[in-house]
Image (tube, rainbow, N blue to C red):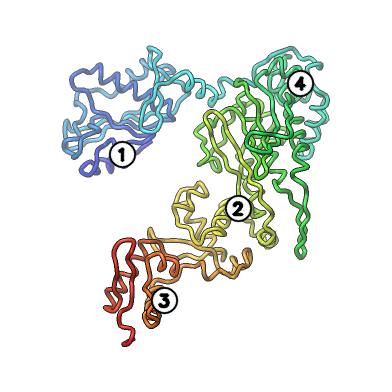
Amino acid sequence: MRSISEITAFLTEFDHCIADDLEDQDLDFKQWDTQSRNKAVKTMVEMAVCMANGGGGTVVFGVADRVRGRERAILGVPLEIDINLLKKAVYDQTDPKITPVFEELRVPEGTGRILIMQVYPGMPPHTDSAGYGTIRIGKDCKPLTGTLRRKIAVETGETDYTAETIAPVDLNLLSPTALEVLRNQSGKEKAPQDLLALSDIELLSTIGLIKAKKLTRAALLLAGTEESLRQYVPGHNWTFLHMTSDTDYSIREDRCSALPVFVQRIEDLLVPFNPITTYEQGLFHFEYRTWPEVAIREALMNAFCHADFRIAGPILIKLFSDHLQISNNGGFIGGITPDNILHHQPAARNPLLVEALTRLRLVNRSNLGISRMFSSLLIEGKEPPVIREIGDSVLVTFLQRELDADFRYFVANESRKDRILGIDELLLLQYLRQHSEVDTATAAGICQRSEIEIRGKLSGMVSAGYLEHGGTGRGAYWCMSPNLYNTIAGDGNAEKRRRIDWEAAKTRVLSILMERARRNEPGLSNEEIRHITRFDRNQARRLILQLMKENAEVVQEGTRRWARYAYRNAQTA
């Protein structure tokens, strides 16, 4: 939500843009209907519902949102409109009840005041008294359709499919094998021994999977037999495919098993294609797989925990010659996207199932699972997983890459010095091994951080000696330090990859132009200047224009893409 000072600042922008340009997920401008108070109040109720369903926001009344010019845009709200009556109207005409906060802002234009309605997030879905509702998506209020209502119910935990009770407690519905594997996996993750020592029924009851002497679906998903799962969770199954092409496969397995058995079986199926390799370098002995076990396990756990079991379709694992895919039905919820998943607050589609797995130490509710997936690959010099949302499903792709021994040794050596590289540092170093430099905006996108946050990270990496900083303002950039590049790359190109200083670049280009003139060779194109200096197109253009201004002998030959720059007075030089 926006403060009074922010709104005041926005009002000064109206001479340069219209209010609609300033609207956002949590901000809207509305003109007050002076012809009909009922219509004006109806609009206010609709906006309160929209913002409450969308996570809260600010609505400014008394502003025409498509008119340029402050005096024309700010029309104001009539002085006789009572704020307390508006608050009561919104409360009376919404369900569940919404109690907005109104603030008055005095202005010299229009009626002399505008009203600011602050709507706090409540317990959606909210509707008006007639049952109609909208939800804020971007800058618009979209109808609260059945699909959106269901999504809200899932996000708020009101419709946890796994928490529903389905049958009286019966050992015949439970798989001894699944329970044994569950205990073994939890024991490896240091789950409390007194918890694991309980009997099967006591264990499930203690972690909340038995309610009123009845089994929940979550209990079967953790420890059920295939028969009980097919009967009570018909939407659950999984498929493993070893693909020989995009359309053909050589191995296929279809099962309907509890989570512990599912994870163990997939790991067993991957063993022939994901063998352990040992690498020795100095005092360090590394054992690694093409795809780290921790990354695969976290991806499988995520696919299972966040699957929508009401959608008939398998958790799908497809192994190709150069990559591995893990997908599940059920898209992202709670505002999570592939572009913010690293740092977003976790949101569980199946809260009871996740709560039970958390108590067994098999999942983490602090959003560390995704970080572990990324870290386990990045420390080996491999690319992080590619996460995509496709329709109402999520797809995680692991590319097949070999261990980068030099980079793994560097990470281990830094760790021995108590310099632990975090996800941000690993992502940036991974990028800079393939690119000569990175700017602030690109770095922020890579690490899913704000530009303010990423500047702090980049500054810390400069202080640690990992990076070097060049340029100022919007032209600021960072590159890997030559010493570090030589350590982890060793191709001798550290200096060649670096952008040279502006004055040094001018001297270098001028020297080459003079030398070419002496040999009666053609001048340089913009592309060749970029190759020499590591500048971008515009920087190379500015550099040559400066050279032409400072040296009358430097001239342009040709125009546009055929332009070349030459030195015309070689004899004097």
Residue topped by disc 1: 22
Label whose residue precedes the other's in the sequence (3 or 2):
2
Amino acid at pointer 2 = Gly
Contact between labelled residues 4 and 2, with CB atoms less than 8 Å apart: no
Q: Residue furthest front?
A: 520
Would you call the spot at circle 3 few (<14 residues within 10 Å), some (14-19), or many (20 or more)? some
Residue topped by disc 2: 422
Q: Nearer the viewer, mark 3 or mark 4?
A: 3
Amino acid at pointer 1 = Leu
Side (left or right) of 330 relative to 4: right
Distance in Å between CA atoms under marks 4 and 1: 55 Å
Is residue 61 depicted above or below 128 in this figure?
Answer: below
Amino acid at pointer 4 = Glu
Q: Nearer the viewer, mark 4 or mark 1?
A: 4
> Residue 15's image quarter?
top left
Amino acid at pointer 3 = Arg
| Residue 509: x %, y % from top left | 39, 74
Residue topped by disc 4: 226
| Residue 35: x %, y % from top left | 18, 19
| Residue 48: x %, y % from top left | 36, 24
| The C terminus: image quadrant | bottom left
Q: Nearer the viewer, mark 1 or mark 3?
A: 3
